[in-house]
Amino acid sequence: MFENLSDRLQNIAHKIKGYGKITEDNISDMMREIRLSLLEADVNYKVVKEFTNKVKEKALGEEVSKSLNPGDLFVKIVRDELQELLGGDSAPLVIDKNPTVTILVGLQGSGKTTTIGKLANFLRKKHSKKPLLVACDIYRPAAIDQLKQIGKELNIEVYSEDGMNPVKIAENALVYAKNNNFDYVLVDTAGRLHIDSELMNELKEICDTVNPHEVILVIDAMMGQDAINVITGFNEAINLTGVILTKLDGDTRGGVALSVRYLTNIPIKFVGVSEKMDGITEFHPDRMANRIIGMGDVISLVEKVQDEIDEKEAMKTAKKMAKGTFDLEDFLNQLKQIKKLGPLENLLKMIPGAKKMGIDSAKIDPKQMAHVEAIILSMTPEERHNPDIIKASRKQRIAKGCGLTVTDVNRLLNQFEEMKKLMKMMKNGNFKLPF
């Protein structure tokens, strides 16, 4: 997400840092480049105009002219204004009511049903909630079956009724949730156009009946600026409390995210970052601004690791590394832990200075990790614990067992041996960074 805009802004920031001072002439050139980069990212032209005016005004201010590092201060101004554009402060989901009721609404095909499953999974994992999914989409064929399948996959209960209208289903579901100790109710509604008065009136009835704490619009980020009209239309009818942008990972421009809050005053609560059931993250304007300007997102990276990596297992592995007893069985367990974090390319982009180090565009072939895993799984427990016993005949058997070559097996064993040497050097204090 934001790849094109991020590249352009980071290049502009690099240029401006080379200036000894900020003047009307050189700032005009920079603002022209910023304006173009935002427009190419599909940011609304009103937003672009307001943003560039604010940045220029602050960049030509007395504080910048007297600064010893005007270029750095200019980058900070751009970063701070990006944060304001994205919403300023985070808008966390309401979670402290019992039960909390959230209704998801949107156009047909926006990804509501999948998103409601992701949101339920997030609430259970992050906030230890007991969610109930409510099937109120009675119009789309197989919509209820789809939600039930998601519920089954996540082991989360789905409430549904046959032959009832959505308003009554939502009302009965709330009673059921209270009687069965569910503390979060997520209502899935049918997709509809914001100009469809009959279906919008139905949504109003549902809201009036269950008094939701959150009414969230799920919208496809790939829609571009048309999304603003949809958000405005829904908000005028049912008073939205937030937006979830789906498929933001597939939109390299990201202009909608930069326009939503300014044009509609509706906060972005979450963004969809993959099709998997854990592919949803809270939206933090400050962290996103840092990523766009090339400052990374260490906090999100740490949170991701904390959520997915088993702390006890990690400590156990660290002790083995320190003692020099780390073996291929431990290495296999580490690979499984790393796979939980998702595509490694996405994690590398969160590291500050990733672009300067040339790792922001690194491509890591998941097949290579799969090959390593297959080789180790083809070994006996004894071979994993003591790789030194793996000679020619064993290598041939392992290669045959995993469908790879002896060369592949040798490569893994050599790499593992080099890793063990590095660990030993670090333990003895002989390891020095090459810079």
Image (spheres, rainbow, N blue to C red):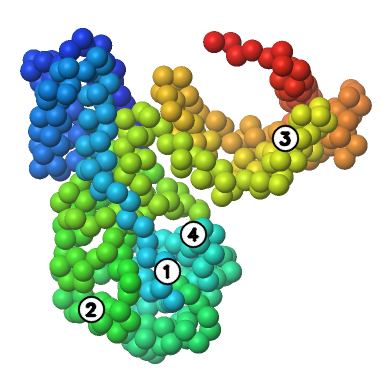
For the residues bearing labels 3 and 4, Cβ distance under 8 angstroms: no
Residue 22 higher or lower than 242, as above or below: above
Residue 400 seen by the camera: no
Q: Secondary structure at mark 1?
A: loop
The mark closer to the camera, 1 or 3, is 1
Give the number of callouts: 4
Say which residue appears at 10% left-offset and 21% top-offset. 28
Q: Secondary structure at mark 4?
A: helix
- For label 2, the residue is 204
- For label 1, the residue is 96
Say which residue appears at 68% left-offset and 14% top-offset. 431
Residue 43 higher or lower than 151, as above or below: above
Please report whichever mark, 1 or 4, sits nearer to the chain's N-terminal start: 1
How far is the residue under mark 1 from the one under mark 3?
Answer: 37 Å
Please report whichever mark, 2 or 3, sits nearer to the chain's N-terminal start: 2
The quadrant of the image that shows the C terminus is top right
The mark closer to the camera, 2 or 3, is 3
| Amino acid type, label 4 | Phe
Q: Residues within 10 Å of mark 4 (few under 14, many from 20)?
A: many
How far is the residue under mark 2 from the one under mark 4?
Answer: 27 Å
Please report whichever mark, 2 or 4, sits nearer to the chain's N-terminal start: 4
Q: Residue furthest left?
A: 24
- For label 4, the residue is 122
Say which residue appears at 37% left-offset and 65% top-offset. 94
- For label 3, the residue is 318
In this view of the protein, which residue sits in the foreground, 102 or 92? 92
